[in-house]
């Protein structure tokens, strides 16, 4: 189980690196935001899944599950609000 947990954590870190690369390489604000929010949400979810595998305690599983739920509920809303703000700017 330890190998699986660490593999998920490393995979999540690699996905975060891809998200960072997307922030540097993509041409406009909306594309960069899309790369950051989608990849970062997936990466953090994978990393937290790896942490859940590494922690045998049920109390940790509840905390990690709440964190994943918080990410899934808040990141799309924040992304949408930022996209609307960027789209309403005349120079965007």
Image: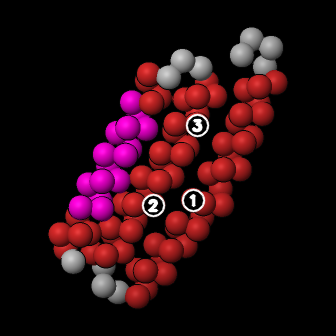
**SS of the residue under disc 1:** helix
Q: Is residue 75 above or below residue 66?
A: above
Q: CA distance from mark 1 to mark 3?
A: 15 Å
59 sits to left or right of 67: left
- Give percent across and percent down for residue 35: 52, 36
Q: Is residue 73 left or right of residue 26?
A: right
- Residue at the location (54% across, 46% down)? 38
Q: Secondary structure at mark 2?
A: helix
Asked which secondary structure carries label 3, the reply is helix
In the rendered structure, which disc, 2 or 3, sits on the residue that comes first in sequence?
3
Contact between labelled residues 2 and 1, with CB atoms less than 8 Å apart: yes
**Residue 19 % position (x, y):** 43, 38
Q: Which residue is mark 2?
A: 45
**Residue drawn 23% across the image and 61% down it:** 7
- Crowd band around label 1 with a 10 angstrom C-alpha radius: few (<14), some (14–19), many (20+): some
Residue 71's tag is 1
Where does the N terminus fall, quadrant-wise?
bottom left
Task: Find disc 3 in the rendering and name its residue.
Answer: 34
The residue shown at (30%, 62%) is: 8
Quadrant in which the C terminus appears? top right
Residue 46 position in % (x across, y down): 39, 60
Q: Is residue 50 above or below residue 36?
A: below
Q: Main secondary structure of the magenta part?
A: helix
Mark 1 or mark 3, which is nearer to you? 3
Q: Where is residue 70 drawn, in percent x and y?
A: 60, 64
Considering only vertical position in the picture, is 45 above or below 22?
Answer: below
**Label 1 to label 2: alpha-carbon separation:** 8 Å
Query: As drawn, which residue projects farthest toward the top?
Result: 91
Which span is picked out in magenta? 7-21
């Amino acid at each position: 189980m330890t190998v699986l947990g660490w593999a998920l954590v490393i995979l999540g870190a690699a996905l975060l690196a891809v998200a960072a690369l997307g922030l540097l390489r993509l041409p406009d604000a909306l594309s960069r935001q899309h790369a950051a929010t989608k990849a970062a949400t997936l990466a953090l979810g994978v990393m937290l899944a790896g942490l859940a595998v590494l922690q045998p305690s049920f109390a940790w599983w509840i905390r990690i599950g709440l964190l994943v739920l918080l990410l899934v509920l808040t990141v799309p809303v924040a992304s949408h609000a930022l996209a609307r703000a960027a789209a309403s700017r005349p120079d965007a």
